[in-house]
Amino acid sequence: MAKRIVLISCVKKKVGHRAKARDLYVSPWFKLAFRYAQRLRPDRIFILSAKYGLLGPDAVVEPYEKTLNKMPATEVKAWAVGVIEKLRRHANLASDHFIILASERYRKHLRPHLGSSEVPMEGLGIGRQLRWLKNAVEQ
């Protein structure tokens, strides 16, 4: 049976100390996205980290300053290859369904490898994403 897997991008705002990935990212957007992901009751939730690649929510990591938004396209592609390799260990890329809560830069090179995926907030600016997430978690 196909699994449902949520992928959430990392954010700039982080705590200043080593923490579980779910607690490292502290922006309002990330907190709402993580709550939304939990409400979906997926089989797995992963965080797309610019530094660490694919992280489980309970992975303990150090804070960092790195974003795909400032990386050259070749580095973003290499990052995506690493994420796909890790994702293959946890999912069937062809048959599992992926719900992606991440910007175009984070998902562009991942989606071609995923047989089934959706981007619920595609095309929304950050303010509209925040409203969409807030509405989704309050229902």
Image: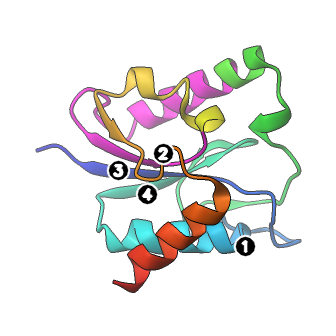
Residue drawn at x 52%, y 66% is 33
Q: Amino acid at mark 1?
A: Val
| Vertical order, 138 against 21 (above or below) | below
Residue 99 is inside the magenta segment: yes
Q: Where does the image place residue 132, in percent across and percent down from the top left?
A: 48, 68
Q: Amino acid at mark 2?
A: Glu
Q: Where does the image place residue 27, in percent across and percent down from the top left?
A: 72, 71
Q: Where does the image place residue 116, in percent across and percent down from the top left?
A: 27, 33
Q: Give the residue pinned by disc 3.
A: 5
Q: Which mark is residue 45?
A: 4
Q: Give the residue pinned by disc 1.
A: 26
* Quarter placement of the N terminus: top left
The segment highlighted magenta reads: 78-103
Q: Amino acid at mark 3?
A: Ile
Q: Between tags 2 and 4, which lies in front?
A: 2
Residue drawn at x 58%, y 63% is 128
Q: Residue reaching furthest bottom?
A: 138
Q: Report, in whole angstroms, how far the alpha carbon at label 2 lies from the one at label 1.
A: 22 Å
